[in-house]
Image: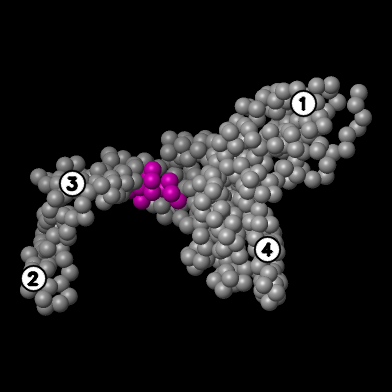
Amino acid sequence: MKNKINIPQTPLAERSRPKTLDDFQGQEKLVGPGKPLCTMIESDTMSSIILWGPPGTGKTTLAKIISESTQSEFHQINAVSSGVKEIRQIIELAKKNLEHFQKTILFIDEIHRFNKAQQDALLSSVESGQIILIGATTENPSFEVIPALRSRVRIFILEELSKNNLQNILNQALTKDEFIKKLNIKSIDSDFLFYVSGGDARILLNILEASCIQEYEKEEIIISKEVIENIIQRKNILYDKAGEEHYNIISAFIKSLRGSDPDAAVYWMARMLEGGEDPLFIARRMVVLASEDIGNASPNALLIAEAAFSAVDKIGMPEGRIILSQCATYLASSPKSNASYFAIDNALTDIKNLPQYQVPIHLRNAPTKLMKELGYGKEYKYPHSFENNFTQENYLPEELKNKQYYLPSENGNEKTIKERLMNLWKGKKKY
């Protein structure tokens, strides 16, 4: 039996973190030769950026590599535990650094968790260049970062790591880590390890290290599927609010809502909440579903989803779970229609693929005498001057006058909408 091992205090994921772009795995479109981030780093012309992508794809690592490569003073904070006071302290340090021509990088992990006031505190310093902001987020910056801050940074999208990237990360840990390379690792079920890590390098390395420690006393260490499964169950690694299982569960939740099963929807929502998911993430997805999958079949769905988002944001947890449950069960129980969703997508397809047809002359605005003389707005029929406040008129470009984008379903309120449109447009449109 082997002697008791001295397990390093620093996790393998941190010990294995690349120090240079040469050792960095993945994101070739950003850090490959001649690519945007690579060029900024090599020319020492870094500007403020936001790195958006799944967890474990290298956001923190890139921030640290940028700091080392540009010889900048590096400050790292987490949006969950830091506030405006800490930001202002770092900004004051940055001002002093500038007096000595020293750049300062402020790396904010989970920047999407900052509220508007916290993000506002960054604006002037980012704009003036007092700090180089590097924000990391797993959420779409268009929704989570205020427009004023977005306009002052460049947004780079990180992609999931490929199987080849994960294999290289695994190999580096096995051959370079002083603790791991001393072990007699006979075999690893790498395909299963990659699968359960969900493309997250941090989870991959955590599972690898935990498996090695568990099997250490054996003459030969075999990291089999069974060993990995035991580690996952014991450490509850899978729901990392980000890995593959996260996406599987949110997918099951959305499909349960779409499939009109309130019981399944509540179950998957409970799984997410118990796993530590941000309740606003769940609420936000329900707002989208209310339009995408319910639409005009039950217009109140969007109002309820939006109200749920606002209420959860104001009240927080644990009471927010009740509001989320009310919203989820309402959406799941509502009649469904994706007609609005298809209408805008089909219209956008035509906008992208067809010429930009002119606005018919009778629909044009005529604010000047010349425009009126040219016939702008002439022969426009004002609907309120006709019976039932309607008259058949062509409102599309002449080339598309028979085109239909919105085809209401027979479900819920949309059936009434369909019947009304059929009555109004009989002979002109087909419903």
Label whose residue precedes the other's in the sequence (1 or 3) = 1
Please provide the residue range marked out in magenta. Answer: 287-299
Q: Amino acid at mark 2?
A: Leu
Q: Nearer the viewer, mark 3 or mark 4?
A: 4
- Disc number lying in front (1 or 2): 1
The amino acid beneath tag 4 is: Ser
Disc 2: which residue = 374
Viewer-side residue, 122 vs 263: 122
How far is the residue under mark 2 from the one under mark 3? 27 Å
**Which mark is on residue 403?**
3
Give the residue type that dot 3 points to: Lys
Up-down: is 290 above or below 187? below
| Alpha carbons under labels 4 and 1: distance apart | 39 Å
From the image, tell me which residue sits under label 1: 185
Q: Give the x, y percent position of residue 155.
A: 51, 57
Marks 2 & 3, CB-CB < 8 Å contact:
no
Q: Describe the element under mark 4 as helix, strand or loop.
A: loop
Label 2 and label 4: CA atoms lie apart by 63 Å
Can you tell which of label 2 and label 3 is closer to the viewer? 2
Residue 185 seen by the camera: yes
> Which quarter of the figure is the C terminus placed in?
top left
Residue at screen point 48% across, 65% down: 151
| CA neighbours of label 1 inside 10 A, class few (<14), some (14 to 19), many (20+) | some
359 displayed left or right of 254: left
Nearest to viewer (mark 2 / mark 4)? 4
Q: Is 10 in the magenta?
A: no
Say which element carries label 1: strand
**To which residue does mark 4 refer?**
72
Mark 2 lies on a secondary structure that is: loop
Judge whether residue 296 is colored magenta.
yes
